[in-house]
Structures are given as C-alpha cells and as structure tokens.
Amino acid sequence: MIEITSDNRLRSLIVVGDRVLIKPKSPTDRTNSGLYLPPTVTEKEQVQTGYVIKVGPGYPIPSSSEDEPWKETEEKVKYMPLQAKEGDLAIYLQRNAIDLEYDGEKYVILPQASILMLDRTENLFD
C-alpha cells in the first residue's frame, strides 16, 4: 500500500469537490477482516476494491448571510465533509471511475456516490 509521506509527490495532489482518489487492489488480496468479492463479480469488473489515498473537501454548502444583508462579507466556501477517509478500504462501482496513472502507479478517481461500502480497520496497513 502506498502511503502519503513528505518525500513523495502524492502530497502535492489536491482532490477537488466530492471526489476520492483510490489505489485499486488486486482481486486476490483480502482485508484483515476477511472481506473479499467472489470471482464472478471481479471478472465483470462492475465492483472493485481499493484503498482511499486522498479525499476532496466535500460537498459545497451555500453560505447564508441573510441576517445582515447590507454588510460586505468575504465569500468563504464551506463544505460538508465526505465519509471516506484516507486509509479506508473502499468497495466501489467501476463504471463511474476514471482510470489514471500518476508517477507510474495506477489510480482511479471517482465521486463519493460511487462508493458502496467502506472498511475502516484500525491496523489496515499492518
């Protein structure tokens, strides 16, 4: 599993909006909890698993400054955070994923709505 460290280029990536950057996992791997997908599902490639590497800020929420409309205010964008966190194992729909390659590694980027389930194990990388 690739972790984000100060010396790699993943730190400089900024994921936008409700998108999630995922490092796909090979279909033969299993989680510590024993979660796996049957071969018939992985052959069709409709559902895949992978590790969440980075997440976007979330869904933008409109600011409400109706209490004093005559005041000039800065437009600060607020976001509703995503459920996915870095290090989670995600089960997602492949048809909504965009494949990309960065620094010789294959990743997918997809909206959070395409994630079906998250496995948040404390010692996932051990």
Image (cartoon, rainbow, N blue to C red):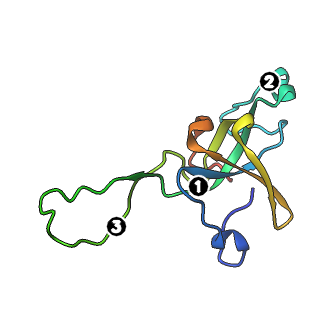
Secondary element under disc 1, as helix, strand or loop, is: loop
Give the CA separation, mark 1 to mark 2. Answer: 25 Å
What x and y, as percent, mark residue 120?
A: 56, 43
In what quadrant of the picture does the N terminus appear? bottom right
User: Is residue 28 rendered to the left or right of residue 60?
Assistant: right
> Which disc number belongs to residue 86?
1
Point out the tag, 1 or 3, that comes first from the N-terminus: 3
In the picture of the structure, the residue carrying the numbered disc 3 is 76
User: Is residue 64 rendered to the left or right of residue 96?
Assistant: left
Callout 1 amino acid: Glu
What x and y, as percent, mark residue 55?
A: 57, 55
User: Is residue 11 rendered to the left or right of residue 70?
Assistant: right
Q: Nearer the viewer, residue 33 or 83?
A: 83
Q: Name the residue at the front extreme.
A: 70
In the picture of the structure, the residue carrying the numbered disc 2 is 41
Callout 2 amino acid: Val
Residue at point 83% right, 60% down? 105
Above-or-below relation of 75 to 33: below
Badge 2: residue crowd in 10 Å (few <14, some 14–19, many ≥20): few
Callout 3 amino acid: Lys
Point out the tag, 2 or 3, that comes first from the N-terminus: 2
Give the CA separation, mark 1 to mark 3. Answer: 25 Å
